[in-house]
Image (spheres, grey):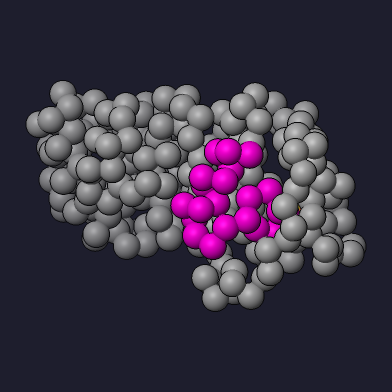
Amino acid sequence: MVWAMTAAQQAEEKPSPAMTREQIHAFFATLQAANPHPETELAYTTPFELLTAVLLSAQATDVGVNKATAKLYPVANTPQAILDLGEDGLIEHIKTIGLYKSKARHLMETCRILVEQHGGEVPHSREALEALPGVGRKTANVVLNVAFGEPTMAVDTHIFRLGNRTGLAVGKTPLAVELKLLKRIPPEFMLHAHHWLILHGRYVCQARKPRCWECSVSAACRYKAKTPA
Ligand code: SF4
């Protein structure tokens, strides 16, 4: 997941007025109709593979992470197997990804804790996830949502921008936006809301030039300076 817009750039864009309850419902109903079962673009088949991919994805593209894990996972896709590779062996597989040295260190330490404290499994609890090296609130939210089906909201750069720009959830920090989204998104949309917002931010409501002229949720969005075609 790449942070495509700096904090300064985000601060320049004024938040929009808050969407009404009806607008929020229409916003998600439209995204749901177009893509009923949205999925993460990170490749994974187990909670551990997902956790690893998310850890590797900071400041990197999902495509780049998928390329590396496509070679890593057939060799090692459990905490014990990664420990058996050793840090140098792991680095050989992930050195195409930015910040690979610190990511390798975090992943080795995470694997050690998973083996020693969680029977080699990814824990299904925010507290235990956030205690793992390199795992913050955002990563824990992704794992809880994607691997365990919890209605959590991981606020990355896209969701932070979208929340403020559309008026869906205005807030000065990712946590403020997260808490507002949890409160304002109707329960029937919560499970998939994270993916709908990320995909919409990545491909339509882009940082520098939102593609308002072809945006399916334009009628519900409160952004005043809509981009013409
Ligand atoms: S109308 Fe424009 S600003 Fe609003 S969600 Fe769509 S792309 Fe983003």
Q: Residue at x 51, y 30 (%)?
A: 151
Q: Residue at x 45, y 44 (%)?
A: 66
Residue 183 lies in the magenta-colored region: yes
Please state the extent of the stretch shown in magenta in the rendering.
164-184
Q: Magenta segment, principal secondary structure?
A: helix
Residue 115 coordinates in the image, percent (x, y): 14, 30
The image shows a total of numbered marks equal to: 0
Left or right placement of residue 48 versus residue 167 in this view: left
Left or right placement of residue 161 versus residue 151 in this view: right
Which of the 4 quarters of the picture holds residue 211?
Answer: bottom right
Residue 143 lies in the magenta-colored region: no
Residue at the right extreme? 229
Residue at the left extreme? 116
Instruction: Please say whether residue 111 is visible from this viewpoint.
Output: yes
Instruction: Please say whether residue 89 is visible from this viewpoint.
Output: no
Residue 20 coordinates in the image, percent (x, y): 77, 44
Which of the 4 quarters of the picture holds residue 147?
Answer: top left
Left or right placement of residue 22 versus residue 62 in this view: right
- Which of 46/32 is in front? 32
- Which of 23/208 is in front? 23
Residue 181 coordinates in the image, percent (x, y): 58, 43
Q: Residue at x 31, y 52 (%)?
A: 94
Q: Residue at x 54, y 62 (%)?
A: 172
Up/down of 143 relative to 139, above or below: above
Quadrant for the C terminus, please.
bottom right
